[in-house]
Amino acid sequence: AAPMPLPVIRKALEEFPGVSFINAFGQTETASTITALGPEDHVLTGTPEEIEEKLQRLASIGKPMSDWQACNLKPADYFQRIEEDPTYTAGFTRKLYEIHSCLAEQLANILDLQGVKRLLDLGGGSGVVSFALLRKHNELTSVVVDVEGVCKTGRALAAENKLDKRMTYLAADIFEDNLPTGFDMVLLCDVGSFSEILFRRIHAILNLKGRLVIVDKFGASRTSAPPSRLLSAFLSSLESPSASIDYITSELVQTRLQQAGFQYISATSIAHLDHLPWNIDWSMLEAHK
């Protein structure tokens, strides 16, 4: 429960030049290793500034480790499982359909769709929000973009809701693949991606005076998780400690929207109409091309 003295490790590096060193630090109270320095941290090469930085690091107790690293394990890859396990994908998509049904109805009641005929629901999953909007606006059509397994379940749900004639599902990567054009509105609901690059792609496919609507949960500050996501934030911190103090805020997203060319940006809090914990903290951003 103490850092390796710098003179000792420097002497060891000199005496054993062909040996790879690992410095691990833990405490009885933590039950495992909590910080570590790998072999690459013990190689004193590079510019004088880089060497000085490594020496400062060697004098410390090391870099924070996640619980996964401490146990020599890898966290489950959600996206890989979605692509490889059709049964899991179908069940997971239907679960999110049920979870988001109340939110979808709320959005259908508060969104102004005047002049909107074509909707692009990016990362729309089952299409649950599109369903609610289509039921309220008879002339509206929607294209939902998601991975193939999710789209397959979405098509079945659209048929069950008797909306399959007005719904199209497109299997595509919203970040890499070419996206269809000519939409009056693009929706990002609970997608969790807010890069300026993505916003620029969306700006390009919108019709003139088209709108981007983002529905998500934002931190009050870069170091504060939304209250309803405190548990997931804690679990994420076990996987990636540094990410646990870097949350997306509404202000940051609005800045990126402006940089991508959007204007007339508004922010609205969505009322919590039921007692389900996952339906609190929702906010809506609306930006115009």
Image (spheres, rainbow, N blue to C red):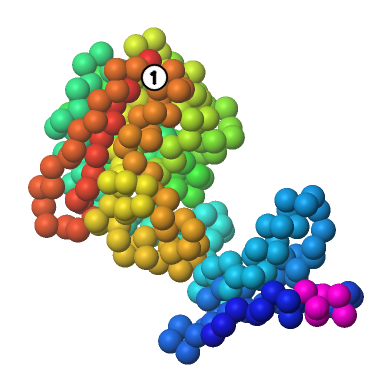
Q: Residues within 10 Å of mark 1 (few under 14, many from 20)?
A: many
- Indicate yes or no whether the magenta region holds residue 245: no
Horizontal relation, residue 177 to residue 135: left or right: right
Q: Circle 1 sits on which residue? A: 262
Main SS of residues in magenta: helix
Query: Measured along the vertical axis of the image, is residue 289 above or below residue 188?
Result: above
Q: At which x and y percent is residue 185?
A: 34, 22
Quadrant in which residue 20 is drawn: bottom right
Q: At which x and y percent is residue 78?
A: 49, 59
Quadrant in which residue 115 is drawn: top left
Segment colored magenta? 10-15
Q: Residue at x 40, y 13 (%)?
A: 207
Q: Residue at x 25, y 35 (%)?
A: 284
Quadrant in which residue 122 is drawn: top left
- Indicate yes or no whether the magenta region holds residue 12: yes
Q: Which residue extends farthest top?
A: 208
Q: At which x and y percent is residue 127?
A: 34, 40
Q: At which x and y percent is residue 28?
A: 47, 89
Q: Residue at x 73, y 76 (%)?
A: 7
Q: Residue at x 10, y 47 (%)?
A: 273
Q: Which residue extends farthest bottom?
A: 28
